[in-house]
């Protein structure tokens, strides 16, 4: 189940990039995933970041060196927050970068830093796809555990029918669901609780009523360990400001009891109490959360 999972979509510079608003929209609205989008500079020549921002319901990451950003280490934060990374279309050029560990744009740099499963959907002219160098790079990535959704035979932009066409959006999503199911089965006995913290203007320290953000999250971790022992794995996720668009969607999931894994919110107190967050408030919120084993 993709609902509540963070899916990082990386778009690289191929003609098939124009299908990506559809992929992003489906993941977000039909599968209720939390989607973050990053694009290489070449990708922005094929599809507008603005269109993607609308589909994603939030900002799009295009620049590694964005001096105006409140998240100067976005590539690390994106890498850590992702449950899955999907790169579609994956160009021959980017596949080579991934295979050889280059990190010169937000997509390749983030891939270097992530431990999340990566799903690639290559797309290119058949003459490029059948090139031995490309095939060797793909084989190298598969050997390192990357998942590859093979391109299909179909109509090429110049009107011929040939291989190398990006797999259909439905095929890419079906593969993602299949991977997610296999991972959820492996992790059956483990309840994953993701603790969202919201940084304040002073960084990640709320500093009110004597409880810092770090103390608060440590308190949550200790309480959960006491209740559930090794059954629980606590993940910390600092939701930096630019990712806050995910909140209404996540809150809706909780309200409908569909969040999986269960989610504990610390940061939402911030909105209702003018920036204040306290230990008792966190305890109160924890009491309202039902923890269930991942099925
Ligand atoms: C019109 C046009 C279409 C292109 N389509 C593809 C494509 O489908 N697949 C591909 O691998 N490269 C394609 N390229 C080449 C890439 O855009 C180019 O290699 C670029 O440097 C890729 O950068 P990136 O991998 O950093 O996004 C195309 C180039 C042009 C001009």
Image (cartoon, helix red, strand yellow):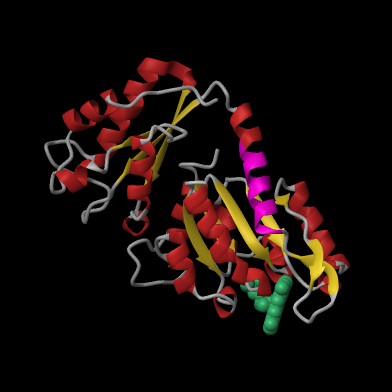
- Check the image and report above or below for 94 versus 46: above
Judge whether residue 257 can be spotted in this image.
yes
Return the residue nearer the eye: 215 or 29: 29
- Check the image and report above or below for 278 versus 148: above
Which residue is at 53% across, 59% downward?
24
- Check the image and report above or below for 267 versus 124: above
Q: Quadrant of residue 254?
A: top left
Which residue is at 58% across, 73% downward?
43
Q: Is residue 177 magenta?
A: yes
Which residue is at 54% across, 55% downward?
26
Position in image of residue 57 (x %, y %): 41, 60
Position in image of residue 159 (x %, y %): 80, 79
Position in image of residue 196 (x %, y %): 35, 41
Q: Quadrant of residue 289?
A: top left
Return the residue nearer the eye: 9 or 103: 9
Image check: 11 left or right of 250? right
Return the residue nearer the eye: 113 or 21: 21
Where are the magenta residues, as a range? 168-180
Count of all numbered marks drawn on residues in the image: 0
Q: Quadrant of the N terminus?
A: top right
Which residue is at 79% across, 72% downward?
155
């Amino acid at each position: 189940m993709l609902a509540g999972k963070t899916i990082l979509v990386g778009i690289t510079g191929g003609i098939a990039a124009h299908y990506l608003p559809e992929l992003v929209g489906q993941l977000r609205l039909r599968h209720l995933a939390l989607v973050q989008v990053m694009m290489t500079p070449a990708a922005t020549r094929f599809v507008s970041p603005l269109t993607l921002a609308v589909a994603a319901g939030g900002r799009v990451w295009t620049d590694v060196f964005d001096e105006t950003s409140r998240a100067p280490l976005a590539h690390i934060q994106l890498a850590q927050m992702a449950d899955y990374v999907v790169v579609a279309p994956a160009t021959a050029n980017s596949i080579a970068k991934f295979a050889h560990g280059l990190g010169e744009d937000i997509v390749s740099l983030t891939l270097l830093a992530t431990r999340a499963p990566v799903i690639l959907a290559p797309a290119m002219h058949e003459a490029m796809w059948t090139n031995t160098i490309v095939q060797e790079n793909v084989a190298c990535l598969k050997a390192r555990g990357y998942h590859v959704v093979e391109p299909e035979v179909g109509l090429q932009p110049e009107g011929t029918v040939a291989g190398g066409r990006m797999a259909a959006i439905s095929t890419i999503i079906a593969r993602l669901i299949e991977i997610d199911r296999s991972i959820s089965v492996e992790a059956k006995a483990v309840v994953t609780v993701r603790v969202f913290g919201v940084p304040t203007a002073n960084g990640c320290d709320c500093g009110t009523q004597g409880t810092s953000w770090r103390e608060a999250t440590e308190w949550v971790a200790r309480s959960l360990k006491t209740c559930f022992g090794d059954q629980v794995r606590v993940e910390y996720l600092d939701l930096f400001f630019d990712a806050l668009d995910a909140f209404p969607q996540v809150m809706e999931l909780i309200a409908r009891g569909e969040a999986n894994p269960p989610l504990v919110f610390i940061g939402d107190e911030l909105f209702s109490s003018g920036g204040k967050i306290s230990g008792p408030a966190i305890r109160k919120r924890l009491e309202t959360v039902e923890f269930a084993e991942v099925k």
